[in-house]
Image (tube, rainbow, N blue to C red):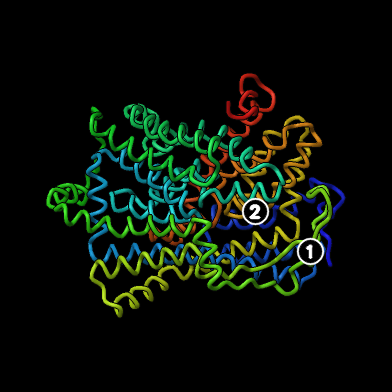
Amino acid sequence: MWSQVYDPFGNMLLSALVAAIPVFVLLGAIGIFEIRAHIAAALGLLAALLVAIVGYGMPAGTAGMAAVYGAAFGLLPIGWIILNVIFLYQLAHEKGAFAVLQRSIGSISEDKRMQLLFVAFSLGAFFEGAAGFGTPVAVTAAMLIGLGFKPLAASGLSLIANTAPVAFGALGTPIIALAAVTGLDLHELSGMVGRQLPFFSLLVPFWLIWAFVGFKRMIEVWPPILVAGASFALPQYLVSNFHGPWLVDIVAAMASMASLAAFLRIWRVDAVMRETSDAATAAHAERMTDTPAEIRRAWIPWIVLAIFVFLWGTPQLRAALDTIWVAKIAVAGLHEVVQKVPPVVAAPHMEAAIFNFNLLSATGTGILLAALISGLYLGYGVGQLAQMYGRTLHLVRYSLLTISCMMAIGFVTRYAGTDATLGLALASTGWAYPFFGTMIGWLGVALTGSDTASNVLFGGLQRITAEQLRIDPVLMAAANSSGGVMGKMIDAQSIVVASTATKQYGQEGAILRFVFFHSVALAALVGLFVMGQAYVWPLTLLTKGAP
């Protein structure tokens, strides 16, 4: 048994600086020195292991098994999702169906701002709600490139858009996990998050278009932006407060897509923003030649994908598939070896380390079946499908390696307790804790790549610290999830997914620089909003629950 130590140097500031070394190495290598992502991830992992073993006294074997556990989790479920989404994209692209799909989306509006809004924000939110774990970024970034967006813009803008839906992603998984680790009521947590994020669901679409074209050209199209945001925010509030966390994103995304498409039939912008390149002009001319049958054929693979990711996201189907086959593997040398201690938890307990090898119920398997069915529908033979899968595996090989290393870093820091050191350093801020507690959630997602993982990591700390400071623990637990969504755009996993989907591998540093300011600024705004909920009327009324 090894007990975590959160202040090994007897000075919380110094301990926090040491704990942050892997973060500095990883982000510095990617964002400043522009080292290729898989090499930067390996350097970050090496730094995390050295900090854990040398700085925190974690046994080398235990630290090594934490890295192995994280790497395995990086492949299943996360890498498995990315591989099969890209496989579906390759199948559609090779048959020309993806180009038809892009032109049909373009027919909703010729204005690039509206296309961005529909694809990245509204459609992306649906995939976030159904599957999460990188699926929306992979799909929307590829679609935007086909609509004429530059790869860097497609990647960065997809990451910015994939924020407001994240707390309720994958059928509410982050909120469900938060309730489990904190012992707080699931519906109270769902409602509190649902009284925080709708304000940012209104803001993010405006922010997205502003990041794309600047403030002046954003104001030109404020009515449809407001429609897209409001039609998402209102269902997000209603479903989260009066039903629960499970269907929030699905309902809100469908309402946003339908409302925006309907509004664009009656509203026209004065100065349409079109691409002026020859390729874009040719695409616009070709759009008129697509028959209804060709458009239906192009949409079928993505409709099948939406159906399968929704089905695979339902707890009932997951449970049924797990009864057929699932392997729960206790990680030797790690399972119940590490003891987490106060003040991170209320009472000492041993950390579990069980790898859930649930290949049948994994979301990526549903995506693979959707891809195979779609491939047969598009006219591929069995041999051609196998050949295309091999090509896709070769295409994403470095991305899979990178994601495995990224998750290995997150698991080493989790089991070593270095992430808890960073959280405790922020938790020592007294009356300003509502702001910095929100930033803990942001930090957790930036480190782990998952709002669910951040909630599991820091949910207990949020409740304990809030109770010590006499702040509503439901408020701070919810703030962990709401603040975390803004960290989603800078976590290395999401950046690698975006670079893979846009075939811009090696440009992760440019993507990180593109989104970093937006991530920090939006997280700070969430923190200020939570401060208002804690101390300032009338925002304090938002902590009282739904009327």
The N terminus is located in which quarter?
bottom right
Residue at numbered disc 1? 338
Residue at figure coordinates x 42%, y 31% from the top left: 230
* SS at mark 1 in the image: strand
**Image height check: is 512 above or below 335?**
above
* SS at mark 2 in the image: helix
Amino acid beneath label 1: Val
Residue at numbered disc 2? 24
The C terminus is located in which quarter?
top right
**Image height check: is 65 above or below 268?**
below
Q: Visible in this render: residue 521?
A: no
Which quadrant of the view contains residue 70?
A: bottom right
Q: Nearer the viewer, residue 71 or 264?
A: 264
Q: State how many labels appear.
A: 2
Disc assigned to residue 80: none
Q: How far across and how far down the image is residue 502, in percent?
A: 38, 57
Q: Badge 1: how crowded within 10 Å, few (<14), some, or many (20+)?
A: many
Mark with earlier residue (2, 1) = 2
Q: Badge 2: how crowded within 10 Å, few (<14), some, or many (20+)?
A: some
Task: Indicate left or right for 96 with 397 as reference.
Answer: left
Q: How far across and how far down the image is residue 423, in percent?
A: 73, 46
Q: Nearer the viewer, residue 534 or 155?
A: 534
Q: How far across and how far down the image is residue 129, in percent?
A: 47, 49
Gap between marks 2 and 1 measured at Cα? 25 Å
Looking at the image, the residue that sits furthest to the top is 537
Q: Visible in this render: residue 181?
A: yes
Q: Nearer the viewer, residue 402 or 83?
A: 83
